[in-house]
């Protein structure tokens, strides 16, 4: 079966293969999915940032920080909401649950059992809203946009392995969109997802922390991005989640960063909106982790032109 985008969907779930299935949704404005932190808490430790933060959240502050991110994102994009599910304290990090392009959603297969309860509600929401589901085998660990990020023009997919996503899933992702996938090896457990240390930006720029990768991965990155397009962050900036950003056109939504990095981004023409997302850093995520892109990646850069 082929979708209206021309993609071969031979492993799409049986629920999406009916002849009566409408074409996948198409968007004319950048569109994201968010999930309110109704049940958000640090109930367990599955990444280094959670250690020492068990049940130490300020829930009122977390809601206030999430609402401000939601408000800021609504100013530059359309925002849809998925209901939070009791017993899913990490569902607020909805960016980890899938990766979407051309109306096709590759749904996550979480490495840790604690997060697998999120998979079915997200799968159901995406199916009910017309997305074609590219199912990930249960034995193949894959964590959505946490570890699979499209380049700014949508012609290349960067995918990480080594901490939470397995290398074997990269071939599976390549088949979903018939695009090249560049595999990057994460070597620092603090940067357990690619979105904690790697962020393609509009105009072909890249915000990244080089020391999160092995030598071969750094070489692959440097071969794809010329020096003038690479924005390397320091360890202090990286551990403040400076790479976990939402970029739409010239606007970057991010947790508070150093004045130096803010100036560097401003000199490149970006409008940096700094937000206090400290309660979510305790769970191991920031702006990008809190929103799942639903529209094609190209829309986020086309509006800048």
Image: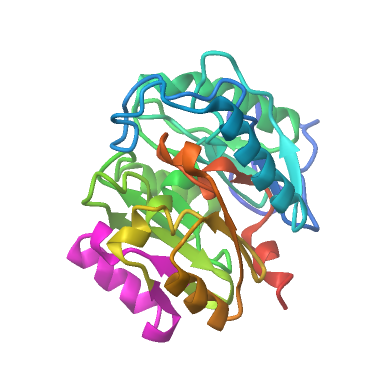
Across and down, in percent, residue 140 comes to 35, 33
* Identity of the residue drawn at 43% across and 38% down: 143
Comparing 38 with 144, the one in front is 38
Which residue is more in the foreground, 127 or 218? 218
Residue drawn at 35 percent across, 28 percent down: 53
Q: Where 155 falls versus 13 (above or below)?
A: below
Assign the magenta stretch its main secondary structure: helix
Which residue is farthest top? 87
Question: Does the magenta-highlighted stretch encompass residue 261?
Answer: no
Judge from the rendering whether residue 85 lies leftward or rightward of residue 45; answer left or right.
right
Answer yes or no: is residue 193 visible. yes
255 is higher (above) or lower (below) than 109: below
- What residue range appears in magenta? 206-231
224 falls in the magenta region? yes
Location of residue 28 by image quarter: bottom right
Residue at the spot 33% in from the left edge and 63% down from the top edge: 209
Q: Residue furthest left?
A: 215
Front position in the image: 113 or 55: 55
Q: Is residue 126 above or below residue 190?
A: above
Asked whether, in this view, residue 237 is left or right of residue 144, the answer is left
List x then y, in percent, for residue 286: 49, 46
Q: Quadrant of residue 45?
A: top left
Residue 24 seen in the figure? no
102 shown above or below 250:
above
Q: Quadrant of the C terminus?
A: bottom right
Q: Between 210 and 9, which is closer to the camera in this rendering?
A: 210
Residue occupying the point 75% across, 54% down: 77
| Residue 34 in the image, given as x and y percentages of width and height | 65, 38
Image quadrant in which the N terminus is located: top right
Residue 240: percent from left, percent from top: 39, 53
């Amino acid at each position: 079966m082929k979708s209206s985008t021309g993609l071969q969907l031979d492993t799409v779930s049986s629920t999406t293969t009916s002849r009566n299935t409408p074409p996948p949704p198409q968007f004319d404005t950048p569109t994201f999915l968010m999930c309110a932190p109704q049940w958000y808490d640090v109930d367990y430790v599955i990444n280094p940032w959670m250690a020492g933060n068990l049940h130490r959240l300020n829930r009122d502050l977390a809601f206030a920080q999430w609402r401000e991110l939601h408000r800021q994102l609504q100013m530059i994009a359309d925002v849809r909401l998925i209901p939070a599910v009791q017993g899913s304290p990490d569902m607020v990090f909805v960016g980890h649950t899938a990766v979407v392009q051309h109306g096709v959603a590759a749904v996550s297969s979480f490495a840790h059992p604690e997060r697998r309860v999120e998979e079915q509600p997200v799968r159901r929401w995406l199916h009910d809203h017309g997305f074609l589901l590219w199912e990930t085998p249960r034995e193949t660990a894959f964590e959505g946009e946490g570890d699979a990020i499209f380049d700014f023009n949508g012609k290349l997919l960067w995918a990480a392995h080594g901490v939470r996503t397995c290398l074997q899933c990269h071939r599976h992702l390549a088949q979903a969109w018939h695009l090249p996938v560049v595999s990057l090896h994460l070597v620092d457990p603090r940067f357990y997802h690619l979105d904690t240390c790697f962020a393609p930006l509009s105009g072909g720029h890249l915000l990244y922390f080089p020391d999160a990768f092995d030598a071969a991965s750094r070489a692959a990155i440097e071969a794809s991005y010329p020096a003038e397009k690479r924005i390397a962050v320091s360890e202090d900036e990286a551990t403040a989640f400076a790479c976990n950003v939402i970029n739409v056109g010239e606007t970057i939504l991010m947790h508070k960063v150093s004045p130096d990095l803010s100036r560097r981004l401003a000199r490149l023409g970006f409008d940096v909106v700094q937000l206090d997302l400290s309660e979510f850093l305790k769970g191991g995520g920031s702006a990008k982790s809190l929103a799942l892109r639903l529209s094609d990646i190209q829309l986020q850069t086309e509006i800048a032109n």
